[in-house]
């Protein structure tokens, strides 16, 4: 096969046995790779009785046909399993170089099953697999683990994906880290890795598959990078990312009320104290790019405090979650707290939202110093840093915060409408009252509240996708048409995690994507069929979630994130979720009464085998 090795590696940690799983070309054509292919592979295992932290929960690290090619912005890989945080479909992706390194081993991915009786790491190189002792790494943070393994393996090409103490301690939102602070942060898949006693995966090799038409690929890349006039406003946003990193969006986001401040109750704060310009003025900051990336949104910051010379980031989501969401305007503490999250291996979004929820409950008197052992007041930077450590180590009140806001609300007897989550996943740092399209995406995305499966704020800022009939418009529009456009945009974004393509990629047209994929694989996709691949993936994940107990009633946002604000440019605005969702369901071919894909839709997508499960 062109673009693929045609196999993934399966490692059973219980028996220490390995085997190759051959990939069918039919499945690759239908699901492409990445998260879409993972859904196809994991579908038979997904059930309500599957324990996310049990040995029977498979964990997949997977690439796609674009991985390791000359196509820009393809340095991502995807990790999938049943989520211990949400209990439903879990997927997370990360940038860097690990994905390309994994594909260079001679495999398109690796599936880990079973559970080791002691800490281990996997060493995969040039078709060879070794299960190595990791007892000396257990209890160590990500950065120290990476340094030790780099020296131990003794191979300059080696790339490392690993957990910190967060994964070892089964924090429900533990991350899996790789390269320079790159995180597969969402859904708690680091806890799945920790439960399997798998500390790390180390990869290297030079076995990349060939592309079908290299000259044609170069021509398609050149054509895809010509930015149409309709995307110039989005281009300026990408240039801002290049100059300041993703944190450069923070000031713009505040002005359009897109930053959930004070736990989703405010939108106005002195952003100039913590934005990308402030970071660049107060610290020496270097741009860091993933494999094949023309943007370089990552940041390496010379820090020089707490015995740390340099740190990765902070990125926008981390800065907003550990900053204004907690009413913290101390840039130094934001940088340090973000670094600790990276080293411990815990998701900065869920960490920040959980801490902000604790502050919200402390102000209401639900939590007290007697219950928590400490004061948890708005903007207390020392408390925020301390809580990050307590969460990662499951110490004191941190043991409760480590479970996420849904379980916190249950524990403390407060309404789920006060818990900022959807389907158990904490809401990210884009306010659904600022862009009503984001509200629909949060309600329906397969893994819960997700800002990458349908980052509709990018559309209404100006990045339309004309050949997918996704048109920029009024960000406060509550219409069936808006809900329908979100569905089409989600299909495109689901495709991105299968190819893979970074969401910041300058390539977004389905026509260009089809041309690139055809040049790599010698297939015959067109704009319609490539979009259908994304739609097929999205719908299969929906069926998986229905198998796991999700119903239409779960497609909702809590009132804490929809009640109108009294300040900012979104003042008084509230999405009409009933109208938006009706348009979304109709576009998807889902039953409006139940939220289930119809038999007709599943047959149309070639998913007839899923009909029996819903």
Image: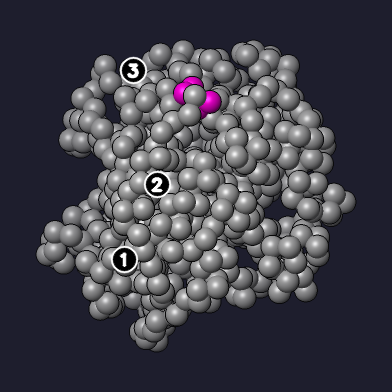
Residue at 66 percent of width and 33 percent of height: 437
Mark 1 / mark 3, whichever is N-terminal: 1
Q: What residue is shown with label 1?
A: 210
Q: What residue is shown with label 2?
A: 220
Residue 386 in sight? no
Is 333 drawn above or below residue 294 in the view shown? above
- Depth check: give the residue in front, 252 or 67: 67
Residue at 51 percent of width and 68 percent of height: 28
- Within the magenta stretch, is there residue 288? no
Q: Which numbered mark, 3 or 2, is in the foreground of this view?
A: 2
Q: Position of residue 381 (x, y in %)?
A: 40, 27
Q: Is residue 148 left or right of residue 261?
A: left
Find out whether the residues at labels 1 and 3 contact each other: C-beta distance under 8 Å: no
Mark 3 / mark 2, whichever is N-terminal: 2
Label 3: few (<14), some (14–19) or many (≥20) C-alpha neighbours in 10 Å: some
Q: Quarter of the image containing the N terminus?
A: bottom left
Q: What residue is shown with label 3?
A: 277
Residues rendered magenta in the picture = 230-234
Q: Which mark is residue 345?
A: none
Label 1: few (<14), some (14–19) or many (≥20) C-alpha neighbours in 10 Å: some
Disc 2 from disc 1: Cα separation: 17 Å
Q: Which numbered mark, 2 or 1, is in the foreground of this view?
A: 2
Q: Position of residue 153 (x, y in %)?
A: 16, 67
Label 2: few (<14), some (14–19) or many (≥20) C-alpha neighbours in 10 Å: many
Is 76 drawn above or below residue 354 in the view shown? below
Disc 3 from disc 2: Cα separation: 36 Å
Residue at 18 percent of width and 60 percent of height: 157
The secondary structure that most of the magenta stretch takes on is: helix
- Depth check: give the residue in front, 457 or 199: 457
SS under mark 2: helix
SS under mark 3: helix
- Depth check: give the residue in front, 597 or 470: 470
């Amino acid at each position: 096969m062109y673009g693929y090795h045609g196999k993934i590696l399966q490692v059973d940690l219980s028996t220490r046995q390995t085997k190759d799983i051959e990939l069918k070309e039919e499945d690759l054509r239908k699901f492409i790779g990445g998260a879409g292919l993972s859904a196809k592979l994991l579908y038979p295992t997904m059930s309500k009785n599957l324990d996310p932290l049990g040995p029977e929960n498979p964990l997949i690290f997977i690439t796609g046909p674009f991985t390791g090619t000359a196509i820009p912005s393809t340095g991502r890989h995807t990790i999938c399993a049943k989520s211990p945080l949400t209990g439903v479909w879990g997927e997370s992706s990360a940038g860097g170089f690990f994905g390309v390194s994994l594909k260079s081993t001679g495999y398109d991915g690796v599936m880990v099953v079973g559970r080791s009786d002691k800490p281990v790491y996997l060493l995969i190189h040039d078709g060879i697999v070794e299960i190595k002792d990791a007892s000396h790494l257990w209890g160590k943070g990500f950065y120290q683990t990476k340094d030790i393994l780099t020296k131990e393996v003794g191979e300059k090409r080696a790339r490392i994906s690993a957990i910190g103490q967060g994964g070892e301690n089964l924090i429900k939102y533990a991350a899996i880290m790789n390269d320079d602070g790159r995180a597969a942060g969402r859904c708690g898949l680091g806890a799945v890795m920790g439960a399997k006693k798998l500390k790390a995966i180390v990869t290297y090799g030079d076995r990349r598959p060939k592309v079908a038409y290299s000259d044609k690929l170069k021509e398609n890349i050149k054509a895809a990078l010509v930015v149409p006039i309709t995307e110039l406003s989005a281009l300026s946003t990408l240039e801002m990312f290049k100059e300041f990193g993703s944190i450069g969006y923070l000031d713009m986001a505040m002005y359009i009320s897109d930053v959930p401040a004070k736990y989703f109750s405010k939108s106005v704060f002195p952003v100039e104290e913590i934005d990308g310009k402030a970071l660049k003025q107060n610290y020496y900051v270097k741009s860091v790019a993933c494999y094949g990336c023309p943007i370089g949104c990552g940041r390496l910051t010379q820090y020089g405090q707490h015995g740390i010379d340099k740190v990765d980031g902070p990125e926008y989501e981390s800065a907003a979650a550990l900053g204004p969401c907690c009413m913290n305007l101390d840039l130094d503490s934001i940088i340090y707290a973000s670094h600790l999250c990276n080293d411990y291996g815990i998701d900065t979004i869920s960490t920040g939202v959980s801490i902000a929820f604790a502050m919200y409950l402390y102000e209401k008197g639900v939590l007290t110093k007697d219950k928590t052992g400490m004061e948890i007041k708005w903007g207390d930077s020392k408390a925020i840093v301390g809580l990050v450590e307590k969460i990662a180590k499951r110490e004191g009140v941190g043991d409760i915060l480590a479970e996420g806001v849904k379980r916190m609300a249950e524990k403390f007897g407060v309404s789920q409408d006060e818990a900022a989550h959807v389907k158990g996943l904490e809401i990210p740092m884009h306010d659904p009252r600022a862009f009503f399209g984001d509200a629909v995406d949060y309600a329906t995305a397969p893994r819960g509240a997700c800002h990458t499966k349908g980052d509709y704020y990018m559309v209404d800022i100006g990045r339309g996708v004309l050949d997918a009939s996704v048109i920029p418009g009024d960000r406060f529009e509550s219409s069936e048409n808006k809900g329908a456009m979100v569905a089409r945009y989600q299909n495109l974004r689901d495709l991105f995690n299968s190819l893979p393509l970074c969401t910041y990629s300058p390539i977004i047209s389905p026509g260009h994507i089809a041309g690139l994929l055809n040049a790599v694989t010698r297939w015959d996709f067109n704009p319609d069929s490539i979009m259908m691949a994304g739609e097929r993936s999205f719908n299969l994940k929906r069926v998986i979630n229905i198998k796991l107990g999700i119903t239409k009633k779960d497609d909702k946002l809590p009132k804490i994130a929809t009640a109108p604000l009294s300040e900012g440019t979104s003042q008084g605005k509230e999405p009409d979720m009933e109208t938006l969702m009706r348009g979304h369901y109709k576009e998807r071919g889902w039953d409006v009464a139940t939220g289930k894909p119809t038999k007709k839709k599943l047959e149309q997508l070639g998913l007839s085998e899923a009909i029996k499960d819903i």
